[in-house]
Amino acid sequence: EYREAVALSQRVHSLALTAGDPTLEVHASGLLGVTYAVQGQHDLAVQWFERGIAVCERHGDALARTLFLLDPEISMRANAGGGLVMLGRADQAREYLRLSLARCDRIGQPIARMVALWGGCTIHMLLDDVDAVDRYSGELGKLVEATGLRQGLGPGLWMRGWVEMRRGKHEEGYAHIMEGLASHEKLGMHGGLPIVLGFAAEALARAGRAKEAEQKCVESLELVERIGERGMHDTKRG
């Protein structure tokens, strides 16, 4: 499916360039960026996100932004963050996050803020900055409570659990990680869950529950194979 998504998006991007349609170009660039990101091809993902961001910056309000449910500039900056960290470009990831949140303040789109805060959690989890993940996951939880954006409930819970686990509350952390995973699954959303199972395995290992931790690692790898998502798989090796 990911190969098909790449092929389709590349055709759309070519059509956008031929037609001189920046809105379509942004749509295709964002889709290519996300598709490469979940496959673990961080360099390609960031390249496509940067292409799309450049189009947003170049055309500004001339883009038909009302056609997007989610502001594309915020989405691409937020989604690029994890890949930038993986490529050793953490300062740029932080700057993208700053710009995303600043734009959220200007346009007042709750779903865009949800994605930006989720991106902030991801960036700082990769940087092992527990305090920052605590801050962003707390803001995400408050946003979900205020707006009812169910897509953000799972990430807020599993990031809260990750923080608890890193602060020595292993059992509480594990419970919140699994609660977040279950919430996401109920929405039919499985993207991102292999790494969440990795968090669960880490919490169990820290709690001294080695056999259960090993089983969660097996489940994570099985899900990777089933959905073809390898975007953050290498963060859990070893």
Image (cartoon, rainbow, N blue to C red):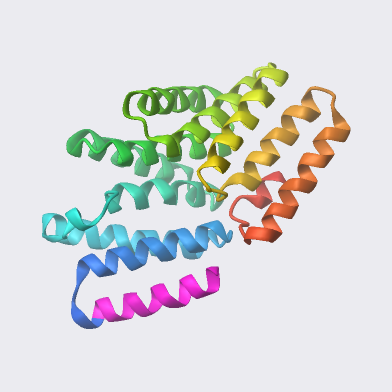
Q: Tell me which secondary structure the magenta stretch mostly adopts.
A: helix
Depth check, front residue: 91 or 116: 116
Point 66% across, 18% down: residue = 172
Q: Residue 16, position in %: x, y? A: 26, 76
Point 22% across, 65% down: residue = 23
Q: Is residue 73 left or right of residue 151?
A: left
The quadrant of the picture occupied by the N terminus is bottom right
Q: Residue 203, position in %: x, y? A: 72, 28
Question: Is 168 situated above or below 41?
Answer: above
Question: Is 166 situated above or below 199?
Answer: above
Question: Is 35 situated above or below 100?
Answer: below
Q: Is residue 167 left or right of residue 1?
A: right
Q: Is residue 238 visible?
A: no
Magenta-span inclusion, residue 3: yes
Give the magenta part as a residue range.
1-17
Q: Residue 165, position in %: x, y? A: 67, 23
Q: Quadrant of residue 204?
A: top right
Q: Is residue 63 visible?
A: yes
Magenta-span inclusion, residue 188: no
Q: Quadrant of residue 224?
A: bottom right
Q: Is residue 2 left or right of residue 29?
A: right
Q: Spot the residue most to the left.
A: 62
Point 28% across, 81% down: residue = 15
Question: Is 50 situated above or below 234?
Answer: below
Depth check, front residue: 189 or 65: 189
The quadrant of the picture occupied by the C terminus is top right
Q: Spot the residue most to the bottom.
A: 18
Q: Spot the residue most to the right.
A: 211
Q: Residue 225, position in %: x, y? A: 70, 60
